[in-house]
Amino acid sequence: MRLNSTLGRITVIALFTLGSTATANAAHGGECATPSIDRLQQWLASGEGATEPATGSILVPGNRHDYTAKIKFLADDWHVMVVWLGNKFEAQADLTHSRGFWMTYRATDDLHVQLRPASHWSGGDKWVTKIPSTRGELVKKFFSFNEKNWTTLPELGKPAYPLSEALDDARGLVFVGKTPNDLEFRSLRIDGYRPPCVYCETGRVRA
């Protein structure tokens, strides 16, 4: 599977009541008025691969007023989960001066995350970094944007652009895995970048 059908045509039915443009200097602040984790509102099961849930938002209420993102990869095949960095598909972020991101998560198996630029969104041939299994334990880990920490997956292909280009117009972090996996995300903070809140009612993700 090339990971280019669903990811190339993600369509979300949404009603935007307040527009916003994503920039690397987005204002600091608390969580958004709608469900979010570190102001990231769009955590989506793309519909590619057998997942639970199959499509749509994976955000669920956590402790007190917090939210957590939960998804299960169910088969020995490629699964895809998307986080839009600017909280809408059309947005992008300049991460060229970011050192990387901190993530608090649990995973029962290894997976990878792709940094997908707006200029080369479609297709599976992307720069990836490994997200190691935590054996189901909750851990906090830093993932650097240093190019030595990013590689490619031969099965998905090698991108025809450098990592620096992906950082320049980053649209999303796309989590991919080819094995069953029980995943939970509690935090995802990108150095030097705070996402802008986009107020919307999210409907469905359609392949």
Image (cartoon, rainbow, N blue to C red):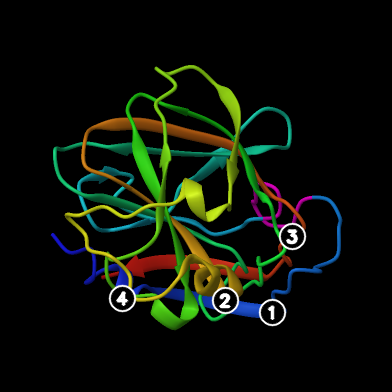
**Residue 205 lies in magenta, yes or no?**
no
Taking the spot 28% from the left edge, 65% from the top edge, the residue there is 158
What residue type is disc 3 on?
A: Tyr
SS assignment at label 2: loop
Decide which of 61, 88 is in the foreground and name it.
88
> Is 131 placed left or right of 52 in the picture?
right
Structural distance between the alpha carbons of marks 3 and 1: 23 Å
What residue type is disc 1 on?
A: Thr
What residue type is disc 4 on?
A: Gly
Neighbour class for label 2 at 10 Å: few (<14), some, many (≥20)?
many
> Is 103 placed left or right of 122 in the picture?
right
Structural distance between the alpha carbons of marks 2 and 4: 16 Å
The residue that disc 2 covers is: 169
Residue interval drawn in magenta = 31-39
Which of disc 4 and disc 1 is earlier in sequence?
4
Structural distance between the alpha carbons of marks 2 and 1: 25 Å
Q: Where is residue 161 in the image (x, y as percent from the top left)?
A: 40, 75
Task: Please identify the residue farthest to the front as the structure is shown.
Answer: 148
The residue that disc 4 covers is: 8
The residue that disc 3 covers is: 193
Q: Where is residue 29 in the image (x, y as percent from the top left)?
A: 86, 55
Neighbour class for label 3 at 10 Å: few (<14), some, many (≥20)?
many
> Is 9 placed left or right of 173 in the picture?
left
Structural distance between the alpha carbons of marks 2 and 3: 13 Å
Which of disc 4 and disc 2 is earlier in sequence?
4
What residue type is disc 2 on?
A: Asp
